Amino acid sequence: MAHAFHTGLVDAAWVTLGALPPGVVAYSIAVVFTGYVVLGVSGFGSALTIVPLLALQWPLTTVVPLVLLLDVPSALLLARLNLERVAWAELRALLPGLIAGTVAGTLLARWMMHGWALALLGLYVLVVAVRGWTGKTVPRARTGRGAPVFGFAAGAVESVFGTAGPLIVAWLGRRQPDPAVLRASVPACLAAATTSALLGMAFSGQLAQAVIWSALLPLAMVAFAGTRVGHQIACRLPARTLQRAIYALLACTGGAMLLRALA
């Protein structure tokens, strides 16, 4: 059935979410809800959770833009729930690099999709995660001079892989030692990176799929519910536990990137 659905979805752009087999709909709702609970707890990780699981039933060319479209309002909702803790200055510093990186990623997507690029990214994320988990002192960036470089890298990675969250966490972790501020600021920066990547996708025609827009509203409601549940969980966690949860997810991300690159 999965294969038949996969082929039918590619060939029939008029398919709507309600016209899909009930099992596929239930699976998709469960995956999206779980992914946004992760986002609500850690401030990132929705795409990393949803994309590989949803791609088992949906074409990858549909999954990535759909998840990015869901990410923007969900990340903004989470930022709104933590508005007083968002470090807006960090977003302003990253924004020029994010835009430039998105343009570069869109133009150089084929070159960047080689295994070595993903392996380097995964290795870097894994090192940052291990240092954060073990409590080793992360070198603090006293100035924002590195923001354009990290912003550029995040924009390029988001436009190619849809997973800029780990890079944003790696940078903000050096700037914001408070895990509550880190968790609040990452979604705001991620929303900017995702919006920039979506503009590139719109320009290249990747958003011109009817099924994306028919599924967007119902799955957005699921995403909002998951984000709120995750937020409530995070509010009950001690600061050190929350910090460890963020770095544990980061470690899983880095490891998954390395395995994918090696495969």
Image (cartoon, rainbow, N blue to C red):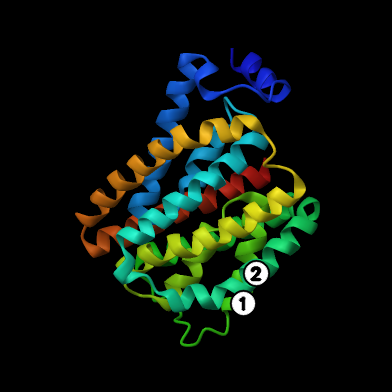
Which residue appears farthest toward the bottom when viewing the image? 143
* Residue for point 35% across, 41% down: 226
> Residue 241 placed where, x, y %?
26, 58
- Percent position of residue 204, x then y: 76, 48
**Which numbered disc covers residue 152?**
2
The quarter of the image holding the N terminus is top right
Vertical relation: 157 (above or below) 63: below
Q: Is residue 239 visible?
A: yes
Return the residue nearer the eye: 30 or 257.
Answer: 30
| Label 2 – label 1 distance at C-alpha | 6 Å
Disc 2 secondary structure class: helix
Count neighbours of disc 2 (C-alpha within 10 A) and say few if under 14, some if 14 to 19, many if 20 or more: many
Q: Quadrant of residue 84?
A: bottom left
Q: Amino acid at mark 2?
A: Phe
Any mark on residue 148, and which?
1
Q: Is residue 25 left or right of residue 181?
A: right
Q: Residue at 42% of width from left, 50% of height from top?
A: 74
For residue 262, what is the image quadrant? top right
Which quadrant does the C terminus fall into? Answer: top right
Q: Are marks 2 and 1 in contact (CB under 8 Å)?
A: yes
The picture places residue 40, in percent across and down from the top left corner, at 35, 50
In the shown orientation, is residue 128 left or right of residue 193?
Answer: left
Compared with 83, 87 (above or below) is: below
